[in-house]
Image (cartoon, grey):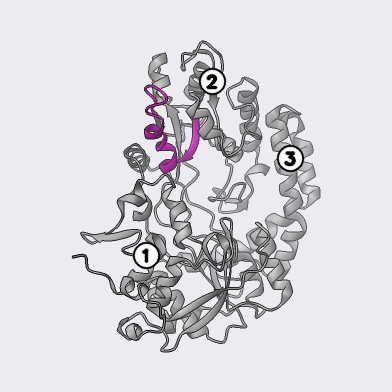
Amino acid sequence: MRHLTLTSAILMTTAMTSPAFAESHLQIVDEPLELTIHMHWPRAQGYGVGGDASKIYPVEEAARAMTNIFLKDATAGANSTDSAEAMNLMLAQGKLPDIVGGHLIQQPVNEYGPEGAFVPLNDLVKEHAPNIQKFWDEHPELQEAISAYDGNYYYIPYLPDGEFARAWYIRQDWLDVLGLEQPQTVEEYHDVLIAFRDGDPNGNGKKDEIPFFSRQWEEVNRLLTLFDARSSGSDTYHDFYVDDAGAIVHPYAQDAYRDGLANIAQWYAEGLIDPEIFTRGSSSRDYLLSENLGGSTHDWFASTSGYNAALADKVEGFNFIPFLPPASTSGVRMEEHRRIPIKPDGWAISYMNEHPVETIKYFDFYFTEEGRNLANFGVEGKTWDMVDGEPTFKPEVLSSDVAVNSQMYLEGAQIQRGFFQDYRYELQWTSPEALEGIALYEANDLLIPQFLGVAFNQEEQATFDKYWPSIRTYMLERQQAWILGAGDVQTEWDDYAATLDKMGYPQVIEVMNAAYARQYQ
């Protein structure tokens, strides 16, 4: 007979106020306490299944049973898919819910927290959240990274687990057909892409192969790293980075970028890059691989390696595998993208919350073993079981046609609350090919440090907001035009650099470095 866990037993009852609460060491309050929450993130605009507050997450039901705290949806901007817009709407309304959570909350929380809109958490955590405090004690640099300009921190972040994320992929079966070895340098990679273009590796007698493609157009910028330039400093596209001198700069304002982008434009002109790289969209990987047209890309380990099994019966001999990043023009191998250890997502306590102690204890619940399992794997007995001390997804979860992460989102797990992710959640559905690739990357020490962001004071934020949005737009417009051949980055570089200066790039870099020095140095 299968034994029910305490949580499962409670969830089978209809009365959430049953005496079973008294048996739980995780219970926070004696009487049920309702807290309102703003939870806006890309996959759901509201705290409920699919953003529908009337459909309570199974994870929420289990958390209620264990803690006696109930979260009630009060999400602003539920009709918008833009989390920043929803946050601005909520702040403008002035009436904040008890908990403010979701996507990209760090900047507004750090800006308005010191003004009194959000509760500083330093002392609350030290006094009432031992599990969160233990995490900070073990990772003091991450607490430093989320702190506002006044030295306090105002939100509990979503903390990813694991290191490796994306990798370079290549059609090993195409290499075999053409009698080629995996490319070890950027020059060899260029030669392989030419061979993919001209050698008919898919064997259909047509010159229809797409040597390099990407389902996210921004990934074409990863080619910059092969020419000793950078495309980003974090897991966010087009981000700033810390240069060798320890200063904050932007990759698209560096001479190395000029030279790297000139090479990307040349590869595009040669037909080595998908001609629809900017328009094909997120379905490009599915289409180009299933139609036996795509040769190489830069994408996530787990999902990309999954195509070997998915297409085994459709494309004979299909073998799409990770390979080491080609050495750059100066001989450097690096993987620019990695899992950032801390996200600008999570949740905060608003100044209108009348129960900050109970709320921080609730946040701490998700750092306990039970709460962390709940946040990562869903409800025990429903989506997973404990097997030999390991949280293990049920076979029906792993074999479903719906991706495991998508299933978890509907359960209320892996959503952008403040929690510490457990890589075992992803490891279970990562293919053997991906695991081999991760081991290969790990053995070659390819990862580089990431820029974890800065917290501006009000004056710095005003300067950044005044100049940066238009600068970023201009950078991306010119970048796309140059790649497509509408202009020449080499001959137009001086005018481009002068325009950046006129638009306020020096002022942006000044406030970035001032904030960085205050926060980290």
Q: Reading the chain from its start, which is encountered first: label 2 or label 1?
A: 2
Left or right for 114, reference 69: right
The disc at residue 353 is none
Check disc 2 and report its element: helix, strand or loop.
Answer: loop
Residue type, label 1:
Val
Is 307 colored magenta in this rendering?
Answer: yes
Check disc 3 and report its element: helix, strand or loop.
Answer: helix
**In which quadrant is the N terminus drawn?**
bottom left
Residue type, label 2:
Glu
**In which quadrant is the C terminus drawn?**
bottom right
Q: Residue at x 64, y 48 (%)?
A: 250
Q: Reading the chain from its start, which is encountered first: label 3 or label 2?
A: 2
Measured Cα–Cα span from mark 3 to mark 2: 28 Å
Does residue 132 appear anywhere in the picture? no
Q: Nearer the viewer, residue 55 or 174?
A: 55
Q: Residue at x 46, y 39 (%)?
A: 334
**Image coordinates for residue 14, horizontal then vertical, percent:** 40, 77
In the picture of the structure, the residue carrying the numbered disc 2 is 209
Work out which residue is located at the far top of the displayed protein and give it. 205
